[in-house]
Amino acid sequence: MSTPTSLKGKVILVTGAARRVGACIASTLHAHGANILLHFRNSKGEAEQLKTELEVQRPDSVSLIQGDLDQTNTFAQIVEQSLQVWGRIDGLVNNASTFFPTPIGSITEEQWDTLINPNLKSPLFLSQALAPELKKNKGSIVNIVDIHAERPLKAHPVYCSAKAGLAMLTKSLACELGPDIRVNGVAPGAILWPETESELDDKAKQTITSRTFLKRQGTPEDIAGAVLYFMKEANYVTGQILAVDGGRSQNS
């Protein structure tokens, strides 16, 4: 059995970490000793609040990194700004995401860019920009994918395509960046309901959870635990995508 990697003193950049699942991932990694580079785009107040809460537990252990991942020139700036904090980066969690429906017949190029950029483009270019530093530290990348990378979701062809691309990018980066950097993915199922999906009523939510083997909704902590496993325990695992979905992806 391989020895777990201690996260004490390690520096991990988590994108989209001010709220929801991203905040839970950041908090979980922090609880296991990591210093967190907490990236956000617009949620400054929530990012500052999370930083304050975490630093009550351990002072000077969280740094805020603001940046728009839609802009390619932002990636180098994020890396430079991140390295100025503790002088190293050991892990990257590509969590930032955008989700909304794009029914065929109404898709615009702007919608395409809005979904492709955070879900696929930024994980590639941010991983590329951080690769030299992660290689030096034998680091790890975890991408937050989606079970709908394999199972299409009605009225969401662009989002599903972006996540399908991220799934293949995860495997491709594992091939390209090994042996020094491990790259894996976590594919959530029904964890948090979308904030913008007002048409997702209680009946629809019940239908979704009934299709899982466990007959219940998951939690952000379930996703954070999977990320922690890849960062801390899985020293001989790379190029893998773990579905955390209560068995939904196995239920035809």
Image: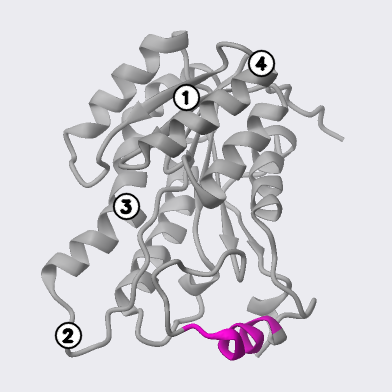
How far apart in space, not on screen, are marks 3 and 2 (Cα)? 21 Å
How far apart in space, not on screen, are marks 1 and 4 (Cα)? 24 Å
Q: Is residue 32 shown to the viewer in this render? A: yes
Find numbered disc 2 in the image and state the secondary structure of the residue it sits on. loop
Residue occupying the point 13% across, 65% down: 110
**What number is the disc on residue 134?**
1
Residue occupying the point 52% across, 45% down: 22
Q: Nearer the viewer, mark 1 or mark 2?
A: 2
How far apart in space, not on screen, are marks 1 and 2 (Cα)? 41 Å
Tell me the chief SS of the magenta region: helix
Which of pointers 3 and 2 lies earlier in the amino acid sequence? 2
* Tag 4 near tag 3, CB within 8 Å: no
Residue occupying the point 46% across, 40% down: 18
Residue occupying the point 46% across, 47% down: 95
Q: Residues within 10 Å of mark 4 (few under 14, many from 20)?
A: some
Amino acid type indicated by mark 2 = Ser
